[in-house]
Image (cartoon, grey):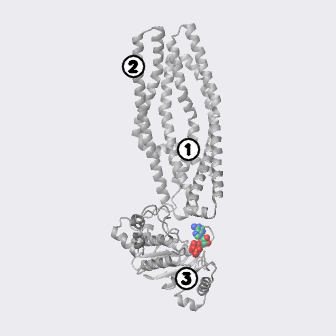
Amino acid sequence: MSSAADDARYRPMVLIRRLFVEQGVGHWRKYAFAFVFMAVAAGCTAFSAYLIGNVINETYVNRNLPGIMVLGAITVALFALKGIATYGHTVLLSQIGNRIIADNQRAVFAKLLREGLGFFSDRHSTEFIARLTAGANAATQVINLLVMSLGRDLLSLIGLVTVMVVQDPVLSFFSFFVAPPAFLVLRKMVRRVYKIGRSQFQGGARIIETLQETLQGIRIVKAFTLEPVMRKRFDDNVAQVEHEANKMARVGARASPLMETLGGCAIAIAICYGGYRVLETGATPGQFFSFITAFLLAYEPAKRLARLNIELNSALVGVRVLFEVLDSPPSEAADDDKPALKVTERRIEFKNVDFAYRGEQPVLRGMSFVAEPGKLTALVGPSGGGKSTVFNLLMRFYDAHDGRVEVDGQEVTQVSRRSLREQIAYVGQETFLFRGTVRENIAFGKPGATEDEIIAAAKGAYAHDFIMAFPAGYETPVGEHGLQLSGGQRQRIAIARAFIKNAPIILLDEATAALDSESELAVREAMDRLSAGRTTLAIAHRLHTISHADRIFVIEGGHASESGRHDDLLAQGGRYATFYRLQLKDQEQPAPAAAATG
Ligand SMILES: Nc1ncnc2c1ncn2[C@@H]1O[C@H](COP(=O)(O)OP(=O)(O)OP(=O)(O)O)[C@@H](O)[C@H]1O
């Protein structure tokens, strides 16, 4: 729910002012040209209404054929000019609109990249997609609505009303009596439209959410035959949006009967009183027809202007959402002005670190350990013990609440995030491959990498041979989630990506958990090569994968409860020894059983 302060910050007038000041003003030259074109088009419309009077008089009163011919020629010229002017302002406004959409999309995307991990774990990713698309479009819609209304409609109205007043001031006065009641009715509808617009927007966002979630989890959806469940979810969302859209249509159209009746009254007055003046007072029929033409032509722009508030309020829902995204302070504020991390020895140390993701629930409690330079240090322990959290703090996805996380004696919070992350190569549990080719995915580790570097990295990760076996080799597309590759192949491409980064610190998070023995062996060999000579911190669930580690820390309850080499820990007969025995037993049993750690 939005607070009262937020509501004040996002009042329609505030949003409109910000839109123009922050997004519209930069395009003022194009807007000025567009206004000139709109003024020309409006002038043509008004003048054509004025000319009708002359046409009628020349035809019926003066019976002047050459005069009628001239009027015909002028009409062609007028409409051609109007066509050119309409083309001009339409193209200009579209160009400005497209630029504003693009700028907003860039701004929202840049904002998202400045957010920390906490921001994303609290929200559903599709929320951003809905905001990115709907918000950016709504900004353009609002600006164009206002520009078109003030430019095209208001200028046309001013021109046509001028013609009406020139032709018959008294009749004009009587015809305008319908305006005040029409405005009163429309005012009442605006609030309701805004409310329905918000709920319509949220429904639309949920449709995108369900769609994206289903696509991302399509394997699970199919494997668990969840199609009916997903269809029901989708149907419910679509039905809600349809319901809101119908409601919006009803409310939006509710004014029509009254507006049309009032319009009919005004036209009837014009016809009766104007006809009476022609018949009884000798006014020229040209005047009368010109007035009626101007009146009828003014009817549409007047209706559009009267409904402007409704249209605006419906579009402002999206603008508010857009500004809410852009206004919130980034949770990972830029810190490039901090000194860069200077890696000398490559020593990592956690000193009595406390941390909680949420409120009072501590995840790390007095976590202390050292990863010695150039050595393999393993973190093992039960699921939820805090192993991945150690990585999160080391890469500064989150900051420790107490204690120190140091690299070569420098506290990580005192150096810039960029310089810290540049020194770390990370291979995660889930291998994420970006849309693109194998080559591009490896090169993400080092933008601008040469062909030789890419091949060397792939060879280092034992990936070169299988990549070359693909018909397209390094140019093989790997799809949005790398679906065409096996788990082991994806892992090795991820390791190649870490290889090419050539960072002094390596973080490996349970990279072999999902692999069969053969793939696991290949990936382990690749990881061993990657680790050689670098400081490596590895999270492992299957203890045999790190039995050769230089030092193993058992992480339990948010701190390191035991540490030592594999053999020493076994000899100690503590928690590590228990885990190890349990895992051995699991492996001996034919039925799959849950590993004791993780
Ligand atoms: N983003 C988050 N927000 C809130 N709580 C979190 C978040 N990430 C992890 N936690 C919680 O922190 C605790 C430690 O999680 P962590 O992922 O560090 O454990 P782990 O030892 O790596 O577990 P696993 O072996 O299962 O991967 C868990 O209780 C988990 O629920």
Q: CA distance from mark 2 to mark 1?
A: 45 Å
Label 2 sits on residue: 73
Give amino acid for label 1: Leu
**Image position, residue 133 (x, y; %):** 52, 50
Q: Quadrant of residue 381?
A: bottom right
**Front position among marks 2 and 1:** 2
State whether label 2 is within 8 Å of ligand 1: no
**Front position among marks 1 and 3:** 3
Is 51 situated left or right of 231 in this image?
left
Category of crowding for the residue at label 1, using alpha-carbon neighbours closer than 10 angstroms: few (below 14), some (14–19), many (at least 20): many
At numbered mark 1, what does the secondary structure look like: helix, strand or loop? helix
Between residues 290 and 415, which one lies in front from this camera angle? 290
Res 299 visible: yes
Q: Which label sits on residue 9?
A: none
> In the rendered view, would you say 532 is above or below 210?
below
Q: CA distance from mark 3 to mark 2?
A: 92 Å
Give amino acid for label 2: Ala
Category of crowding for the residue at label 3, using alpha-carbon neighbours closer than 10 angstroms: few (below 14), some (14–19), many (at least 20): many
Give amino acid for label 3: Leu
Residue contact at pointers 3 and 2, CB within 8 angstroms: no
Of the four image quadrants, the one with ligand 1 is bottom right
> In the rendered view, would you say 574 is above or below 520?
below
Instruction: Tell me which numbered mark, 1 or 3, is placed earlier along the sequence.
Output: 1
At numbered mark 3, what does the secondary structure look like: helix, strand or loop? helix
Between residues 586 and 366, which one lies in front from this camera angle? 586
**Image position, residue 470 (x, y; %):** 42, 67
Residue contact at pointers 1 and 3, CB within 8 angstroms: no
Which image quarter holds the C terminus? bottom right
Q: Which label sits on residue 543?
A: 3
